[in-house]
Amino acid sequence: MALPTENVGSLPRSSTLQATIADYDAGRISHDELAAAQDAACRDSIRRMEATGSPIVSDGEQRESSFATYPLTDTLAGTGLAENLAADGQYFAIFTDGHHRQLPRLTGGPFRYQTYAAEFVAKALPMAARPLKQAVIAPSMLALLYPLDEDVPGYKRDRFLEDLCDECEKDIRQCFDAGAARVSIDFTEGRLACRNDPRNPWTGRGMLNHFIELNNNVLDRFTAEERRNIGIHTCPGGDCDATHSADVDYAELLPSMFRMNAGYFLIQLASEPDKERVYRLIGEHSRDDANGVPQVCFIGVINPQNPRVETPSEICDDLLLAAEFIPPARLGSTDDCGFSPFSIDVKPKHGSPDIARDIAFEKIAARIAGTGMAAQHLGL
Ligand SMILES: [Zn+2]
């Protein structure tokens, strides 16, 4: 296909898998039994994603506690939490429906990942006939593990940030070494950093520039050729069919975001009220040359928080309008977010995670079809 198209990463875990995770948390089943259920879920995810015609697939993050906590804990309930962490960290986000997600808190050094995403790649690769992608978490998100104001005894913040960037670099490199074709970095905290929500103090500290610098610290360790296949994902969050920062104006984020020297960007857009304005901003601020690599902009054409399946012609229309502002050679399509970034997600607007899982594959198939139509219209 002449217009590239790629998913973000996650798919809903079936209600059976979510119940299996709860059984593991309660000590009713062994880790081997959980792993067997995750294996089956990854195999099913890859098979069904390949059946949509998708040129690149993921394992749906079926083994991960969440997009952000996979390096730190085996389950969202905290089973298998890594050393030097306590469960009572700061809120990562408060969502529009009032629920929140909390991060662990760093209690000492040195900071090390317990699980690298390459473990997921190694297990998924033999299941896939198509190229495999893996999403990883950004250093900017994990920087929030360090308490906002206090020092961790014996472990200065600067030292932590050095260790953190080393771990993130290792996470990405190991994914490629394990056989991933592409690695995208989840950066949902970027837009949230502009929100200034008094209930969630870190969002009021003007941390966006710090986040961009941290992420560039890691990106700049890779060659231009490597960075062609390293992406950044931005979104206003997606959990339990709710968002955390959709009210933040994209104009506050995008000029900074495109300062990151990544080769591609997966950008939530289908759920934006004024898409044309955002296409224009992307056209203005994305770069042909980000330290040796063009920034390819994958625009969101699918809203994973809404059960209505977008039609291929709607998707085609979105891409054709976007192509008026973004050079077609740097245009692609994606979903607004993962379909379930957190493992435990009942997908309330869909009725159940099982229905949401079926709908996700329908939506991906529509994205592939609509993107093909747009490529044809554009003569690519
Ligand atoms: Zn997202």
Image (tube, rainbow, N blue to C red):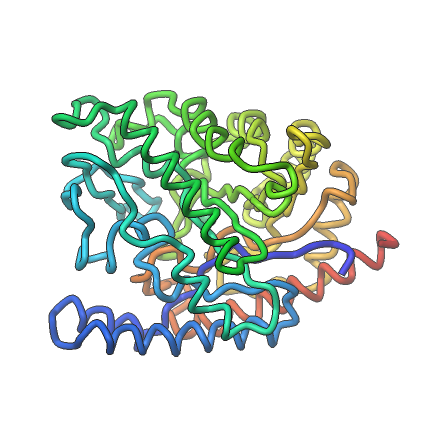
Q: Please provide percent x and percent y for residue 199.
A: 24, 31
Which residue is more in the foreground, 88 or 39? 39
Furthest toward the right, the residue is 379
Taking depth in this image into account, of 46 and 218 the one nearest to the observer is 218
Residue under the point 21% across and 29% down: 147
Q: Looking at the rendering, which quadrant does residue 94 occupy?
A: top left
The percent position of residue 130, horizontal first and vertical second, equals 61, 69
Residue 20 placement, left or right of 84: right
Q: Quadrant of residue 105?
A: top left
Q: Look at 52% across and 48% down and name the residue there.
A: 184
In front of the other: 161 or 232: 161
329 up-or-down from 253: above or below: below
Residue shown at 41%/51% (left/top)? 238
How many circles with numbers are drawn on the protein? 0
Report x, y in % for residue 350.
42, 67
Instruction: Give the quadrant of residue 166.
Output: top left
Relative side of 356 to 33, left or right: right
**81, above or below 47, in the image:** above
Where's the N terminus, which quadrant?
A: bottom right
Q: Is residue 269 above or below residue 356?
A: above
Residue 223 x/y as whole percent: 60, 37
Residue extending farthest front: 177
Image quadrant where one finds the C terminus: bottom right
Q: Is residue 128 left or right of residue 162?
A: right
